[in-house]
Image (spheres, rainbow, N blue to C red):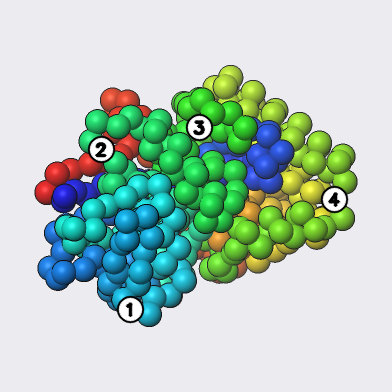
Amino acid sequence: MECRTSAPGKLLLTGEYAVLRNAPAIVMAINRRAVVHISRGENSTHSISTPGLREGTWRFEIDDERRIAWLDEVPDSVRLLPETVLRCRGISGACPVHIDIDTRPFSDPETGSKLGLGSSAAATVALVAALSRPDEKIDHTWSISREVHYAMQGGSGADVAASCFGGLLVYRHNVDAPPETLGWPLGLHYRVFNSGVPASTSAAVERSASGMLFDEDWAALGQAAERVAAAWCSGQASRVLESVRVYRDALRGFDLSGSVGIFSAGHETLTDLGDSLDVVYKPSGAGAGDCGIAMAMTVECLDRFSEVAMSRGFVPLDVCLLYTSPSPRDATLSRIPC
């Protein structure tokens, strides 16, 4: 068996936290990809390397029940993905292979810290696809990947959907059907910035679960998320921008009520500055670091905002929506026989 697969990362535009209560999230696949290469092993055992996560190569064996026995001391960050995937997707123990999982595009090249662009979901989808039969449909890959990723770190699965289907999606956590694909509204411009502060999604979600949040806090956030989804489906740029502003404000109120820290790490300052420059800025995903997205009706507004953001230590990222052609469900994953 020898193949190469890849899957894109994601940027969550709206719906963070609300999606956990079955409200819609708007998520887009981005032009950064995790690449999995499975090749014939050079030794008598399986091995794995994970550039972008941890440097090194670790050997392992697989028993008849698809359990991994590690032959080297392996970091937990490396251990979790292959152990979880192989419970669902086996490889033959009789034919040693080397698995290379490359997520370097998802890290800062200078510091090595993650940028918060969905590397774990992209790696999960790419590895599941690599261990799938070539004739399996992308919907099946999505089903297995959601199961694997949820077992590893919980969450809504929006990032897995972006990695599987590509494009711009309306995603609902409690719906088994493939997410709906959207078009980007003409006249709506955006830029992505990194705060330089790494964030933990699981830690932020735990804070929201244990904080002083009431049903009305969740309800307000869910209603704002529904409004955003309706606006995106309309295709009207001005309506989308205003709905994102409303959702951003609801998310800010949610953050204040629960002391979640979503707008920490400089996001709150940029939010206020954006409003003064006709730009809607919000953190993307769990917040408390990682990335934020700025949206505006003109490039000139974004240019002025970018200068301010960079003066406060935020770094603009070369991140854009990954369109797939001809069909997102067939073309997002590129399985290339070696």
Residue annotated with mark 2:
133
Residue 182 position within the rendered picture, expressed as x and y whole percent measured from the top left: 49, 26
Query: Given the image, on which type of amino acid does mark 1 rest?
Result: Asp
Query: Which label was assigned to residue 169?
Result: 3
Decide if residue 273 is in sight here. no
Q: Outermost residue toward the bottom?
A: 73
Query: Which label was assigned to residue 213?
Result: 4
Residue occupying the point 75% across, 55% down: 208
Q: Which badge, 3 or 2, is on the more N-terminal residue?
A: 2
Q: Is residue 43 left or right of residue 249?
A: left
Query: Given the image, on which type of amino acid does mark 2 rest?
Result: Arg
- Which of the 4 image quarters holds residue 217? top right
Q: Which badge, 3 or 1, is on the more N-terminal residue?
A: 1
Query: Given the image, on which type of amino acid does mark 3 rest?
Result: Leu
Q: Which badge, 4 or 3, is on the more N-terminal residue?
A: 3
Circle 2 or circle 4, nearest the eye: 2
User: How far apart are the alpha carbons under marks 3 and 2?
Assistant: 26 Å
Residue 301 position within the rendered picture, expressed as x and y whole percent measured from the top left: 56, 45
SS at circle 3: strand
- Which of the 4 image quarters holds residue 279? top right
User: How far apart are the alpha carbons under marks 4 and 3?
Assistant: 28 Å
Residue annotated with mark 1:
72
User: How far apart are the alpha carbons under marks 2 and 1?
Assistant: 29 Å
